[in-house]
Image (cartoon, coloured by chain):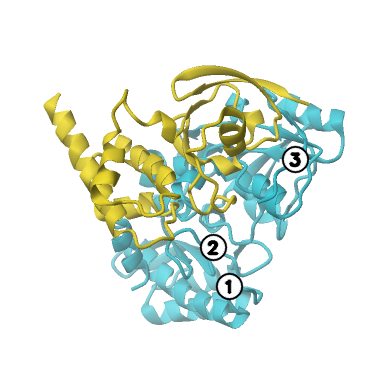
């Protein structure tokens, strides 16, 4: 019953033979060993499992491996640029935008996606974009601050080019 | 969280091939579009498909097209996020774009499709009232041809449509609307994001001149009947009348009489009826006042609830 798929994962082409009913989340964590992507609710409510699928953020807990042939997937492991943290990661570190850290990979992937589209989001736009990412440690103040800091950094990098 | 039991996933490249897969493999097959309902049904509700037919390799099911007469064709696999952000839809029918933006999160809306959402026939589907006031039709393909039905007649009960196994919903068709048609959708829910509607109300009107003489009126509700519905008696109260605050009150009362809500974990039936009354009035008065461009999400929300 296995199916053969070819995907691009964090920039690398992989040919895999997988059960088509396996969730993308489990494929990443259990088969490929990339455990940065987390399972929270398992039903698309919490955003902890967010990855970029063909450049768009999705809940990997609701994607089947059998739909993935030809897909381009970026996980939290693919965010850093060479040896350096991505500006979004750096900003979350700097602003203390994480406590237990469980929601953080999803928050970071969603933030990257937001800032790819809009480098100067308002607070409202940030809250709107992150509404599908739940943090249960505390509130969202530092997370939003981190997104704003990352946005400013990205704008600065852009201007410096 | 439970994991799926084994099943095959087929990826046909044409509608014909998709239909044939169902006749070839028999009962127990399920269509897969975005998976935001199907995979949750597998994980949470004990659904065990024998096989799944993924539609995403069929190119003709994507895209939003406008014809020269102003009608729109929306491919069934168009995602909620594509509808939310489509410049064409935002310009022509901002309330439809907004209703799509009310669904789940961006992650969900990047996967959830308009065709899947309609075929799933959830009574609380936010996009349904917006499509109902546009007199939308759906095109359904089956092995022996295709047919086009009014969305209003497509839904037959909670989770039930006229579709049978092997049918594929291929397009949403929106006929041209009158030139000055203006609509409003209000989702009334306890949380602003990531929640289902207690009540959803869409109102579309043509309000002529400064007196707001009503030349066309369409009202649709979700989450308050076994299917999303039009409220024809409430609409009839409006035709060729001036849209005033007191008429809007009466229209709200009539819409409230026409719906048949249930009591559940979210809300009592009585509260839902009351919220239909209030939000129909609000939606009607906002639709009659016309579109306001370039408002932020919260500014639009504040306008809806004022």
A9 is higher (above) or lower (below) than B70 = above
Label 3: state its secondary structure.
strand
Badge 1: residue crowd in 10 Å (few <14, some 14–19, many ≥20): few
Name the residue carrying label 1.
Answer: B266
Residue B156, horizontal then vertical, whole percent: 73, 58
- Mark 1, secondary structure of its residue: loop
Q: Looking at the picture, does residue B190 appear above or below residue B48?
A: below
Q: Is residue A121 visible?
A: no
Chain under numbered label 2: B
Distance between mark 2 and mark 3 Cα atoms: 24 Å
**Label 1, label 3: how many angstroms apart (C-alpha)?**
29 Å
Which disc is residue B196 wearing?
A: 2
Q: Which chain is cyan?
A: B
Q: Are marks 1 and 2 on the same chain?
A: yes
Q: Indicate the colour of chain A.
A: yellow
Judge whether A51 appears above or below B239 on screen: above
* Earlier sequence position, callout 2 versus callout 3: 3
Q: Which residue is mark 3?
A: B30
Q: Residue furthest left?
A: A160
Instruction: Please give left or right for residue A118 compared with residue A45 in the image.
Output: left
């Amino acid at each position: 019953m296995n199916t053969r798929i070819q995907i691009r994962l964090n920039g690398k082409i992989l040919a895999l033979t997988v059960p088509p009913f396996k969730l993308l989340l489990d494929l990443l964590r259990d088969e490929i060993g990339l455990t940065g992507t987390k399972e929270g609710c398992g039903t698309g409510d919490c955003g902890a499992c967010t990855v970029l699928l063909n450049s768009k953020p999705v809940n990997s807990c609701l994607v089947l491996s059998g739909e993935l042939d030809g897909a381009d997937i970026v996980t939290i492991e693919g965010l850093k640029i060479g040896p350096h943290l991505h500006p979004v990661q750096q900003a979350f570190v700097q602003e203390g935008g994480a406590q237990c850290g469980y929601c953080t990979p999803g928050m970071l992937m969603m933030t990257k996606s937001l800032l790819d589209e809009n480098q100067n989001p308002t607070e409202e736009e940030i809250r709107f974009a992150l509404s599908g990412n739940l943090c249960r440690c505390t509130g969202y103040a530092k997370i939003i601050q981190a997104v704003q800091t990352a946005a400013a950094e990205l704008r600065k990098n852009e201007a410096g080019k | 969280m439970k994991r799926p039991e084994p099943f095959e996933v087929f990826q046909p490249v044409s509608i014909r091939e998709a239909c044939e897969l169902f006749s070839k493999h028999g009962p127990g097959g399920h269509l897969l579009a975005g998976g935001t309902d199907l995979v949750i049904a597998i994980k949470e509700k004990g659904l065990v498909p024998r096989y799944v037919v993924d539609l995403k390799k069929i190119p003709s099911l994507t895209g939003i097209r406008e014809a020269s007469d102003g009608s729109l064709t929306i491919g069934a696999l168009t995602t909620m996020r594509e509808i939310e952000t489509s410049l064409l839809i935002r310009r022509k029918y901002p309330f439809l774009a907004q209703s799509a933006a009310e669904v789940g999160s961006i992650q969900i809306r990047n996967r959830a499709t308009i065709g899947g959402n309609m075929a799933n026939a959830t009574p609380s589907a936010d996009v349904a009232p917006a499509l109902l006031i546009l007199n939308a039709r759906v095109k359904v393909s089956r092995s022996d041809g295709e047919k086009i039905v009014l969305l209003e007649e497509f839904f037959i009960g909670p989770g039930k449509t006229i579709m049978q196994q092997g049918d594929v919903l291929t397009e949403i068709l929106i006929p041209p609307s009158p030139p000055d048609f203006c609509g409003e959708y209000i989702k009334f829910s306890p949380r602003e994001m990531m929640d289902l509607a207690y009540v959803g109300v869409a109102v579309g009107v043509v309000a002529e001149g400064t007196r707001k003489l009503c030349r066309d009126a369409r009202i649709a509700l979700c989450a308050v009947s076994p299917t999303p519905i039009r409220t024809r008696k409430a609409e009839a109260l409006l035709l060729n009348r001036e849209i005033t605050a007191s008429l809007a009150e009466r229209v709200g009362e009539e819409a409230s009489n026409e719906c048949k809500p249930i009591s559940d974990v979210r809300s009592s039936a009585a509260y839902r009826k009351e919220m239909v009354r209030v939000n129909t009035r609000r939606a009607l008065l906002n639709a009659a006042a016309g579109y306001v461009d370039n408002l932020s999400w919260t500014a639009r929300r504040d306008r809806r609830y004022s």
